[in-house]
């Protein structure tokens, strides 16, 4: 071991200590979730939400365009006809079964763009962790409930 190698090693340690000291007195970047709210941009795409009309009827007509365009095949739609006794949407058809598999969804937003009625929106809910994989397949009843994200939406 020569004196040159010792000096190089000492110099490397000084460089590492300089980096440590540079960030030691700055504000940490971590957020104490869920105590603190997360800051999100308006275009953030989180959990899907099915929309309703002001009179309470569903906007989804069960056309299946969202399922057809989904590159991950995460959406399953099964349509049915409205009857006089049971009316779920304003049109003749409605989505009898609507499921999104969040183990496959890549949140690309193609489904939202393909929806002709504007029934499907990607909200700001991002806390999708569940205890089992089966719970990550969300049905129509869950998607019709508006999510309450624990986030602050930033300005554009």
Image (cartoon, rainbow, N blue to C red):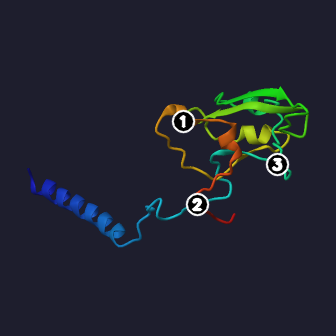
Residue 19: % across, % down: 32, 64
Identify which residue is drawn at 68% across, 54% down.
43
Decide if residue 13 is on the left or right side of residue 75: left
Q: Where, by quadrant of the figure, is residue 109 drawn?
A: top right
Mark 2: which secondary structure? strand
Which is nearer the N-term, disc 3 or disc 1?
3
Give the labeled residue for mark 1.
135
Please tell me whether mark 1 or mark 2 is closer to you in this view. 1
Give the labeled residue for mark 2.
151
Mark 3: which secondary structure? loop
**Image disc number at residue 29:** none
Q: Are marks 1 and 2 in contact (CB under 8 Å)?
A: no
Mark 1: which secondary structure? helix
Q: Nearer the viewer, residue 34 or 113?
A: 34
Identify which residue is drawn at 85% across, 53% down.
54
Q: Is residue 75 visible?
A: yes
Residue lying farthest to the left in this orientation: 1
Label 2: few (<14), some (14–19) or many (≥20) C-alpha neighbours in 10 Å: some
Residue lying farthest to the bottom in this orientation: 25
Q: As displayed, is residue 98 above or below residue 52?
A: above
Decide if residue 28 is on the left or right side of residue 66: left
Identify which residue is drawn at 64% across, 52% down.
147
Give the labeled residue for mark 3.
56
Q: Is residue 108 visible?
A: no
Which is nearer the N-term, disc 2 or disc 3?
3
Please tell me whether mark 2 or mark 3 is closer to you in this view. 3
Q: Where, by quadrant of the figure, is residue 118 drawn?
A: top right
Which is nearer the N-term, disc 1 or disc 2?
1
């Amino acid at each position: 071991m020569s004196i040159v190698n010792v000096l190089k090693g000492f110099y490397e340690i000084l460089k590492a200590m300089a980096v440590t000291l540079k960030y030691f007195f700055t504000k940490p970047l971590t957020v104490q979730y869920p105590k603190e709210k997360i800051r999100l941009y308006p275009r953030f795409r989180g959990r899907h939400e099915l929309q309703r009309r002001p009179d309470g009827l569903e906007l989804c007509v069960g056309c299946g365009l969202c399922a057809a365009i989904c590159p991950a095949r995460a959406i399953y739609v099964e349509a049915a006809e409205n009857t006089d006794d049971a009316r779920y949407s304003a049109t003749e058809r409605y989505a009898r079964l609507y499921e999104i598999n969040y183990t496959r969804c890549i949140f690309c937003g193609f489904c939202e763009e393909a929806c002709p009625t504007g029934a499907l929106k990607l909200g700001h809910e991002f806390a999708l962790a569940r205890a089992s994989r089966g719970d990550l397949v969300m049905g129509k009843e869950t998607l019709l409930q508006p999510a309450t994200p624990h986030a602050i939406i930033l300005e554009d």
